[in-house]
């Protein structure tokens, strides 16, 4: 619906979501979302509004307790606590109030890792617009919760410095998948993408959330599972052909990661 308040200009709009059904506390609950075109008089000052706020600045700037958020940045605000935000110039914002059982943990994790104000990718605006439209049409709460979760994942993605090249990480992943059966390590992958091992390791973790060696072990585990299910090769051969080097290392790692021995995994059925 169109929304008129001190400091807001046409075509500002806000939509509220109906009450949720009882979903067992598993879902993110949208409270309301909107798109505001704010003038210099715009200010929100509240003691509480029981929800968490994601506010994306598309143009202009918004002032809040965590500083001034400018175009391309997002503000995270815990509205269960007293809060104030607004603009002294102008701003175009897209925003979402959300709640639900998993909401506080997600909100606090995001604030801890990224801060209360941080740059975010352009896809943020697209996701918020989708959520706004889904709230307007009273989309199914499960579908909406999934979209909110996707937005939170998008915001939590590690930001790579501009001088770093994400394609090097892709090259390294392809190297590992091509050579997982061989006794390769971090140094080999770093050499393959023309980086020093230390710089390569930092870049790889920033882009994927894993160390290069953790990724390599994941590839080996994936291939081992495929061999166990698709062939009758002995466990010792599976260990050798997937780069684990020894039965003992393979069995210990497999049990630690899956909770099963390789043979139990082979015979459990899918």
Image (spheres, rainbow, N blue to C red):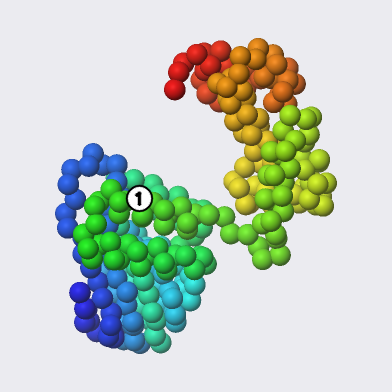
Q: In this view, does 199 lie to the left or right of 108?
A: right
Q: What residue do we see at 47% from left, 58% from top? A: 155
User: Please, which residue is most extreme toward the front here?
Assistant: 231
Please say if 200 is above or below 64.
Answer: above
Residue 234, located in which quarter of the rendered image? top right
- Can residue 80 be seen in the rendering of this structure? no
Between 264 and 206, the residue placed more toward the observer is 264
Residue designated by label 1:
146
The x and y percentages for residue 82 are 30, 64
Give the position of the C terminus as an image quadrant. top left
Residue 241, located in which quarter of the rendered image? top right
- Can residue 5 be seen in the rendering of this structure? yes
Q: What residue do we see at 27% from left, 85% from top? A: 10
Q: Is mark 1 on a helix, strand or loop?
A: helix
The x and y percentages for residue 130 are 35, 64
The x and y percentages for residue 87 are 38, 81
Give the position of the N terminus as an image quadrant. bottom left
Please say if 212 is above or below 97.
Answer: above
Q: What residue do we see at 69% from left, 14% from top? A: 236
Q: What residue do we see at 21% from left, 59% from top? A: 138
Residue 8, located in which quarter of the rendered image? bottom left
């Amino acid at each position: 619906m169109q929304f008129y308040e001190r400091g807001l200009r046409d075509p500002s709009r806000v939509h509220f979501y109906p009450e949720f059904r009882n979903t067992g506390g598993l879902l993110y609950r949208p409270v309301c979302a909107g798109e505001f075109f704010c003038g210099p008089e715009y200010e929100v000052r509240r003691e509480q509004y029981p929800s968490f706020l994601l506010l994306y600045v598309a143009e202009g700037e918004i002032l809040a307790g965590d500083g001034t958020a400018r175009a391309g940045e997002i503000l995270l605000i815990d509205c269960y606590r007293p809060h104030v935000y607004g603009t002294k110039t102008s701003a175009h914002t897209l925003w979402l109030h959300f709640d639900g059982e998993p909401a506080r943990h997600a909100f606090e994790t995001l604030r801890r890792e990224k801060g209360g104000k941080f740059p975010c990718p352009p896809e943020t605006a697209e996701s918020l617009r989708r959520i706004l439209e889904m709230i307007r049409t009273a989309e199914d709460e499960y579908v909406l919760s999934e979209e909110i979760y996707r937005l939170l994942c998008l915001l939590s993605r590690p930001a790579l410095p501009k001088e770093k090249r994400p394609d090097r990480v892709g090259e390294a992943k392809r190297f590992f998948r091509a050579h997982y059966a061989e006794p390769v390590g971090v140094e080999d992958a770093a050499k393959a993408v023309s980086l020093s091992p230390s710089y390569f390791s930092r870049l790889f973790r920033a882009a994927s959330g894993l160390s290069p060696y953790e990724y390599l072990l994941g590839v080996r585990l994936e291939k081992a599972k495929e061999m166990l299910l698709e062939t009758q090769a002995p466990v010792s051969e599976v260990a050798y052909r997937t780069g684990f080097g020894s039965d003992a290392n393979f069995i210990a790692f497999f049990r630690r990661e899956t909770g099963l021995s390789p043979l139990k995994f082979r015979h459990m059925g899918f």
